[in-house]
Image (spheres, rainbow, N blue to C red):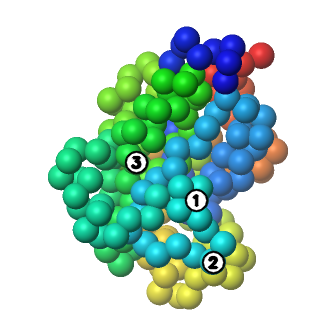
Amino acid sequence: MSNNSEKRGRILILVAPSGSGKSTLAKRLRDMYPSLQFSISATTRKPREGELDGRDYHFLSPDQFEERLRNGEFIEWEEVYNGTRYGTLRSAIENQRDKGYHVLLDIDVKGAHRINEMFGDDALSIFVKPPSIDELERRLRARGTEDDVSLQKRLDRAREELEWEDRFDRKIVNDDLDTAWNELRTIVRPFLGAP
């Protein structure tokens, strides 16, 4: 990014329960704003078919993750399903910001809250929520990727995440994707200094 390299980028944080439409909204943001770079998280889970290290995630062994944790390299991290760890490497954010890019984070509520507090006015956190838990369950069932046990875990986690919604800068209810997208663009445009 040549025209903005002297200015440090800002941090945009999208938070939402699984199935709320966050990934779709994040993709639209990245398509619209080339200066917005996705922060690649680190994880201890194995790559899925087609995933590449350094593109989709930084795939680390549990020992590698633990070593980086001890070295203070993570700005936030969380242990989620089945003991799998996910985290954001400080270098992944700072390298992009130093180049003048804005950074888009798609992380869990606790990590998002920590980063939002840490970076103050340089960060904007937006909570994307489903219109209801029933609608969220319908969306997750429609994906066809969950069995009853994993579906219940995701719904239980969603209920916990929804308790955090008032701790973020802005909130969007994704009842209709186009309406949510227009609202998100209205919030993000001035924050990124975009036309």
Residue positioned 35% across, 78% down in the render: 82
Between 110 and 89, the residue placed more toward the observer is: 89
Above or below 168: residue 73: below
Q: Quadrant of the C terminus?
A: top right
Q: Give coordinates of residue 86: x percent, y percent.
A: 39, 60
Q: Give coordinates of residue 140: x percent, y percent.
A: 63, 73
Residue positioned 65% across, 66% down in the render: 135
State the residue position of label 1. Answer: 56
Q: Amino acid at mark 3?
A: Thr
Q: In the rendered view, does 144 fall on the left or right side of 126?
A: right
Between 153 and 120, the residue placed more toward the observer is: 120
Is label 3 in a helix, a strand or a loop? Answer: strand
State the residue position of label 2. Answer: 49
Labelled disc at residue 88: 3
Q: Amino acid at mark 1?
A: Asp
Circle nearer the N terminus (1, 3) = 1
Above or below 135: residue 150: below
Circle nearer the N terminus (3, 2) = 2
Are circles 1 and 3 on residues that touch, CB within 8 Å? no
Task: Rate crowding at label 2 as few (under 14), some (14 to 19) or many (20 or more) other CA atoms within 10 Å.
Answer: few
Q: CA distance from mark 2 to mark 1?
A: 11 Å
Q: CA distance from mark 1 to mark 3?
A: 13 Å
